[in-house]
């Protein structure tokens, strides 16, 4: 069997496996017969495939490729580029990046290179002060449903070619929630990476991120359906891939909330035409400040609603909900979830207390390259320094304890230098006001025994001198 045929056959096996989750609601009797015929044919093909393969390779990279490939002569000479890996929590010296599947210009709209810090110049998101939950599924085996989650549907841990770490594949018509989230204060941020399969159908439903007040999550959501949002106290943010036919990106957004705010917030917004993320992967950032909701997708601010959250609701639940997928190949995936609480007060802590520490300045894996989504935090620090022209600070980098001690120390010093350079180059803070140092893993802020502790230790401190 040729390599191409084997790859296609493996992809079909994976598609068939994913499709087995579907719970299709059919109203047309004629469609019932058609569906039964399809299922019978699929079962026969699956049986034949199973005889030839005892083990299917991990990963679902083929789901992210175009359904119809153009002939080689049509794509010859097109520029290729590397995908940017998604960062996992184990990020100092032990992370490994999966093999990269280059993306051609057709699927990226001609966009090349990774986003720069300046490309996020309107990104004012600042993560919460204290990390309380991190989920990268590193403790879960591929093929399993994550041990710290619950659902009334189905799902499994997978890998995606060209991205870092593991993802949770979300099955149809259900709710998926981490059982370790039990309280949400009036100030918090929630971030996650979201991916979809290419060719995602326009008719497949929104992915909804739920913030709610529940008494018993397992009981309240056991028979939950996508249209039941008005049956509980909460708020939903809906996201959907851009257009039909495989165009990448997230474009349709809805916010559904408790009355009286519900009707006010039912509308849609779209990405600018030039925004085409790679691999159908976007970064979603949600920021609550009392009643205010801010929603960002990558660097694009979708919503800034001053009265979205109900101050009378005691939110204690975060989850995701899906509708039945219109096409069985359609899937949503989530990864790298991060919940932080508290409203950071950069000005007071740096000027009055003399020290400000942040986990909001992020770096590429094993690198001192600053991720562009760090722009909001850097801008806030630069504003404080601009307003207080006599203040000088020392920038101190810290890492978690993964990897070699000496390498972590070197990395932390390089990262503090990168922050200094960014403050000078992008915000005009003169270098004579900035000193740098790095402590590696030597001064932990939390135990390095949990994902949350490690994330808290990967930080940058600013100390007034």
Image (spheres, rainbow, N blue to C red):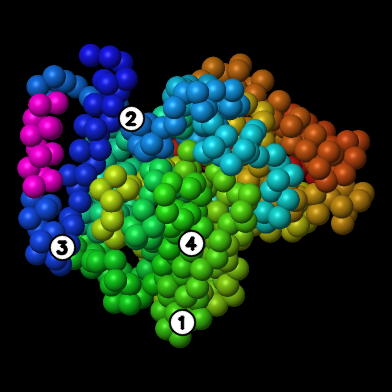
Q: Which residue is found at the position 33% from the left and 57% from the top?
A: 204
Q: Position of residue 182 (x, y in %)?
A: 36, 60
Tell me the CA gap for discs 2 and 4: 28 Å
Mark 2 to mark 3: distance in Å? 31 Å
* Residue 216 visible here: no
Residue hosting label 2: 59
Front in this rendered view, residue 314 or 209: 209
In front: mark 2 or mark 3? Answer: 3
44 is within the stretch colored magenta: yes
Which residue position holds label 1?
263
Q: Position of residue 230 (x, y in %)?
A: 33, 77
Element carrying mark 4: strand
Disc 4 from disc 1: Cα separation: 17 Å
Asked if residue 410 is positioned above or below residue 175 in the image, the reply reads above
Q: Is residue 106 rendered to the left or right of residue 204?
A: right
The residue singled out by tag 3 in the image is: 26
Q: Are the two marked residues, 1 and 3, in contact with CB atoms closer than 8 angstroms?
A: no
């Amino acid at each position: 069997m040729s390599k191409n045929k084997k790859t296609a056959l493996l992809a079909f096996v994976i598609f068939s496996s994913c499709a087995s989750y579907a719970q299709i609601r059919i109203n047309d009797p004629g469609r019932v017969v058609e569906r039964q015929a399809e299922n019978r044919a699929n079962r026969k093909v699956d049986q034949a495939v199973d005889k030839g393969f005892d083990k299917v390779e991990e990963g679902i990279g083929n789901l992210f490729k175009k359904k119809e490939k153009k002939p080689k002569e049509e794509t010859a000479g097109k520029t290729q580029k590397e995908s940017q890996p998604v960062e996992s929590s184990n990020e100092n010296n032990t992370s490994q990046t999966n093999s990269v599947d280059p993306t051609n210009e057709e699927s990226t709209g001609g966009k090349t290179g990774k986003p720069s810090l300046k490309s996020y110049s309107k990104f004012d998101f600042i993560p919460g002060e204290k990390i309380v939950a991190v989920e990268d599924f590193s403790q879960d085996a591929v093929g399993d449903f994550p041990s710290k989650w619950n659902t009334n549907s189905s799902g499994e841990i997978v890998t995606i070619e060209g991205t870092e770490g593991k993802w949770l594949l979300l099955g149809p018509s259900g709710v998926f929630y981490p059982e370790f989230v039990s309280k949400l204060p009036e100030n918090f941020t929630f971030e996650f990476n979201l991916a979809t399969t290419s060719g995602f159908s326009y008719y497949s439903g929104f992915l909804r991120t739920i913030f709610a007040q529940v008494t018993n999550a397992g009981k309240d959501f056991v028979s939950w359906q996508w249209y039941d949002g008005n049956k509980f106290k909460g708020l939903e943010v809906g996201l959907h891939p851009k257009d039909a036919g495989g165009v990448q990106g997230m474009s349709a957004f809805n916010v559904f909330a408790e009355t009286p705010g519900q009707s006010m917030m039912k509308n849609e917004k779209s990405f600018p035409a030039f925004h085409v993320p790679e691999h159908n992967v976007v970064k979603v950032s949600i920021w609550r400040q009392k009643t205010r909701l801010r929603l960002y997708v990558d660097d694009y601010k979708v919503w800034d609603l001053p009265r979205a959250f109900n101050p009378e609701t005691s939110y204690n639940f975060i989850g995701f909900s899906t509708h039945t997928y219109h096409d069985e190949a359609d899937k949503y995936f989530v990864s790298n979830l991060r919940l932080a609480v508290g409203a950071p007060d950069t000005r007071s802590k740096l000027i009055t207390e003399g020290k400000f520490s942040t986990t909001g300045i992020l770096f590429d894996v094993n690198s001192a390259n600053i991720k562009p989504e760090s722009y909001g935090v850097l801008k806030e620090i630069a504003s404080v320094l601009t307003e207080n022209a006599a203040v000088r600070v020392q920038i101190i980098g810290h890492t978690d304890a993964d990897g070699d001690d000496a390498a972590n120390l070197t990395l932390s010093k390089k990262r503090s230098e990168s922050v200094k350079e960014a403050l000078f180059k992008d915000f005009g803070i003169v270098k004579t006001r900035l000193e740098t140092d790095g402590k590696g893993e030597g001064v932990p802020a939390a135990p390095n025994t949990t994902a949350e502790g490690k994330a808290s230790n990967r930080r940058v401190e600013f100390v007034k001198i």
